[in-house]
Image: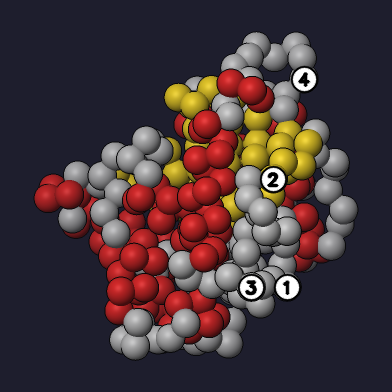
């Protein structure tokens, strides 16, 4: 499936809500129909784009709308990115944490159930979703879709013209504190069920990123009690996993619905 999902306008959100004063600190909220029983389980979605301002949350509106049609509230996060003032690490991640805190503090206002949260991110958003789970003990379920979950390896492969160097503001060696805090491979996430989803034909973020992440976490599971799972989808590419029109989407939707139950 081509990457035309990036350019097709998504269905409109129910509300655009600001969680900060910067123009990029907002989220698009979608709520199930009034026939659904409130409070609603919620999916917090973090879009990808190698952390760059060139890419915004628009394309992720499609998967959010698809999940909302199945009875889940969705919050599609926007945040400061490389090229925005204050973007890159740590500002980008500070925005993700602020948006999460805002949603938890205002859950009742929007009929959201703070006990039933799934955090999900695509590509660079997968890195941010796992980092959020590492820093927020209340998060119990996190899904990475074709995630950039190993920053050292992403740097070694020079993915997307050294996007990791731009994001960290230096190489992993030059900024070791940033690297340790930002790299999911280095972080402990003992309280959360982690699902790494990847298409076997992904030519943007190699599927070995998710395979090796799960293998590494399982090796450490006895000591750190991490719960990591791999869902590899044969024949699927980088954008298939966020496109509700693709065969891959059915498996992802079923996973998110199960985690939200």
Give the Cα separation between the discs numbered 4 and 1: 33 Å
Q: Secondary structure at mark 1?
A: loop
Q: Are marks 4 and 1 in contact (CB under 8 Å)?
A: no
According to the picture, the residue beneath numbered tag 3 turns out to be 85
The residue positioned farthest toward the front in the image shown: 21
Residue 129 drawn at (x, y percent): 48, 52
Rounded to the nearest whole Å, what is the CA distance between mark 2 and mark 4? 23 Å
Q: Secondary structure at mark 3?
A: loop
Q: Is residue 155 left or right of residue 166?
A: left
Q: Which quadrant would residue 107 be assigned to in this image?
A: top right
Mark 4 vs mark 1, foreground winner is 1
- Label 4 – label 3 distance at C-alpha: 37 Å
Q: Which label number is shown at residue 54?
A: 1
**Residue that label 4 marks:** 33
In the rendered image, is residue 240 in sight?
Answer: no
Q: Residue at x 54, y 72 (%)?
A: 88
Q: Which residue is mark 2?
A: 18
Dot 2, crowdedness within 10 Å: few (<14), some or many (≥20)? some
Mark closer to the chain start, 1 or 2:
2
The residues tagged by marks 3 and 1 sit, at their Cα atoms, a distance apart of: 14 Å
Establish if 100 lies above or below 131. Answer: above
Q: Residue 81 appears in which quarter of the rendering? A: bottom right
Q: Earlier in the sequence, mark 2 or mark 4?
A: 2
Residue 126 at what x, y percent from top left?
A: 50, 57
Of mark 4 and mark 1, the one earlier in the sequence is 4
Relative image position of residue 178 (x, y in whole percent)? 36, 73
| Residue sitting at x 65%, y 36% | 74
Q: From the image, which quarter does the N terminus lie in?
A: bottom right
Q: Is residue 129 visible?
A: yes
- Number of the front mark, 1 or 2: 2
């Amino acid at each position: 499936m081509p990457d035309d999902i990036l350019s097709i306008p998504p269905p409109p959100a129910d509300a655009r809500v600001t969680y900060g004063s910067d123009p990029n600190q907002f989220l698009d909220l979608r709520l199930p129909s009034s026939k659904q029983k409130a409070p609603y389980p919620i999916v917090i979605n973090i879009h990808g784009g190698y952390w760059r301002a060139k890419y915004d949350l628009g394309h992720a509106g499609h998967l959010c709308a698809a999940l909302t049609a199945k009875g889940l509230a969705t919050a599609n996060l926007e945040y400061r990115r490389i090229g925005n003032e204050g973007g890159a690490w740590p500002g980008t991640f500070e925005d993700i944490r602020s948006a999460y805190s805002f949603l938890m503090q205002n859950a009742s206002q929007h009929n959201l159930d703070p006990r039933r949260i799934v955090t999900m991110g695509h590509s660079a958003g997968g890195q941010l979703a796992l980092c959020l789970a590492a820093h927020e003990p209340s998060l119990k379920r996190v899904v990475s879709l074709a995630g950039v979950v190993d920053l050292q390896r992403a740097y070694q492969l020079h993915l997307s013209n050294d996007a990791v160097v731009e994001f960290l503001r230096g190489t992993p060696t030059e900024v070791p504190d940033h690297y340790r805090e930002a790299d999911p491979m280095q972080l402990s996430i003992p309280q959360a069920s982690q699902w790494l989803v990847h298409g076997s034909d992904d030519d943007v973020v190699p599927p070995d990123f998710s395979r090796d992440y799960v293998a590494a976490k399982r090796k450490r599971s006895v000591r750190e009690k991490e719960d990591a799972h791999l869902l590899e989808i044969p024949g699927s590419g980088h954008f298939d996993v966020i496109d509700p029109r693709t065969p891959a989407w059915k498996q992802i939707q079923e996973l998110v619905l199960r985690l939200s139950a």
